[in-house]
């Protein structure tokens, strides 16, 4: 493996002063960068890529030189961090070939083509003031505005929220080398909600009202049956007070008129008792129906539900909620 030392970049101050990547960098910072760079190179040759990366980053803080950036790219590729590698590669190629050795520059261009297919870009736009947006949990600048982030190919999640508005969660599927653009527009809660019922609102009321009506009809029938029975009892009591009780129309010693009277009273009592039984049954049915209607009214209370239609670009908003 070839060594990664870039001692050629640490030239005299008079030469470096004409180089834009060396402007404002003191000799002390250059020496510090060189020392950390050599430590990182030794670790890289041992395949200790994480430790080497830390040394290169220390060197970068002393001097942001394209060659140091490219050594960082090499580490990040080994650590399977293509997005960070691509960002650093862009910085390494900022000034073109001049700050890099010829073979390093050619290698950098090859990496650029390779990483271009392993990285995607997501552009998020938002015009509503005060909307907070995150991409995969990382905060983006608050709206209005737009932000572009490089990401790995695959699934990514955008979450946008603002007080008084329905929070939106959108899942993005991006492929390497592509650029996905997302426009965020939140909907006020008042416009995103609707009240839903288990049944049409008239059904529980019809059941409840019908039950009350049936129970009322039964109560009226019960009242008539009771009046008929009372009338029977009064007539029997009156006749018995006169010494004539009509208990059995088939009893011996009754005249034809008495037998007819006894049969009328017996029929009157039987009808009253039958009407009373029917009335009690009707009242029971009506009461059960009214109770069922009352339960349905409670169960059919409106529920506030949040929902949105699919957004442009094929993304689905999956936010929902209930009071």
Image: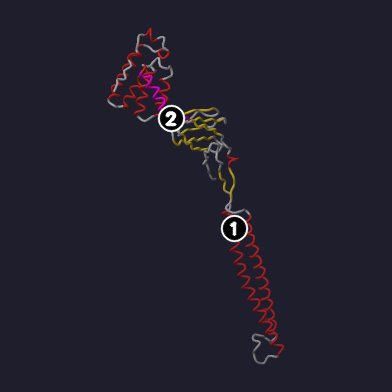
Residue indicated by mark 2? 119
Can you give x and y, in whole percent of width and height, for residue 190 in the image? 60, 40
Structural crowding at the residue carrying mark 1, measured as other residues with C-alpha within 10 Å and reported as few (<14), some (14–19) or many (≥20) = some
Please identify the quarter of the rendering in which residue 144 is found: top right
| 131 to 295, vertically: above or below | above
Q: Nearer the viewer, residue 219 or 210?
A: 210
Q: Does residue 44 appear left or right of residue 246 in this picture? A: left
Please, which residue is most extreme toward the top here?
14
Question: In the image, is residue 84 above or below residue 215?
Answer: above
Quick one: label 1 or label 2, which is nearer the N terminus?
A: 2
Residue at 43%, 32% in the rendered image: 152
Residue bounds of the magenta highlight: 103-121
Q: Is residue 257 above or below residue 25?
A: below
Give 82 or 225, whichever is nearer the viewer. 82
Residue 108 drawn at (x, y percent): 39, 22
Q: Indicate the colouring scheme.
A: secondary structure
Residue 277 horizontal/vertical position (percent): 61, 73
Q: Quadrant of the C terminus?
A: top right
In front: mark 1 or mark 2? 2
- The residue sitting at the right extreme is 257
**For residue 113: magenta?**
yes
* Closer to the camera in the image, 216 or 323: 323
Q: In this view, does 202 lie to the left or right of 314?
A: right
Relative to residue 140, is residue 274 drawn left or right? right
Q: Does the magenta stretch include residue 168?
A: no
User: For residue 60, which numbered disc appears in the image?
Assistant: none
Instruction: Calculate the distance from the C-alpha at mark 1 to the C-alpha at mark 2.
Output: 61 Å
Which quadrant is the N terminus positioned in? Answer: top left
- Residue under circle 1? 294
Q: Pinpoint residue 18: horizontal percent, then vertical percent.
A: 41, 9
**SS for tag 2?**
loop
Whether tag 1 and tag 2 are in contact, CB under 8 A, the answer is: no
């Amino acid at each position: 493996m070839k060594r990664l030392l870039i001692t050629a970049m640490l030239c005299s101050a008079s030469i470096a002063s004409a180089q834009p990547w060396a402007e404002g960098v003191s000799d002390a910072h250059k020496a510090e960068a060189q020392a950390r760079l050599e430590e990182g190179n030794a670790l890289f040759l041992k395949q200790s890529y994480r430790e080497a990366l830390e040394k290169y980053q220390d060197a970068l803080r002393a001097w942001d030189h394209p060659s140091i950036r490219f050594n960082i790219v090499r580490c990040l590729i080994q650590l399977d961090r293509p997005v960070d590698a691509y960002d650093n590669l862009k910085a390494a190629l900022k000034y073109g070939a001049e700050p890099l050795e010829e073979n390093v520059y050619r290698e950098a261009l090859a990496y650029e083509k390779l990483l271009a297919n392993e990285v995607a870009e997501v552009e998020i736009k938002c015009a509503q003031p005060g909307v907070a947006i995150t991409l995969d949990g990382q905060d983006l600048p608050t709206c209005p505005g737009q932000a572009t982030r490089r990401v790995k190919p695959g699934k990514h999640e955008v979450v946008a929220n603002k007080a008084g508005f329905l929070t939106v969660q959108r899942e993005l599927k991006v492929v390497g080398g592509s650029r996905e653009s997302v426009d965020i527009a939140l909907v006020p809660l008042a416009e995103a909600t609707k009240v839903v019922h288990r049944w049409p609102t008239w059904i529980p009321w019809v059941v409840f009202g019908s039950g009350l009506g049936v129970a009322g009809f039964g109560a009226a029938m019960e009242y008539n049956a009771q009046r008929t029975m009372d009338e029977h009892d009064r007539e029997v009591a009156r006749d018995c007070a006169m010494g004539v009780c009509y208990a059995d129309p088939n009893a011996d010693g009754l005249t034809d008129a008495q037998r007819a009277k006894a049969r009328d009273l017996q029929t009157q009592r039987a009808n009253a008792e039958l009407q009373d039984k029917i009335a009690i049954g009707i009242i029971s049915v009506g009461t059960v129906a009214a109770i069922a209607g009352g339960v349905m009214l409670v169960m059919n209370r409106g529920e506030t539900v949040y929902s949105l239609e699919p957004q442009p670009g094929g993304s689905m908003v999956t936010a929902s909620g209930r009071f």
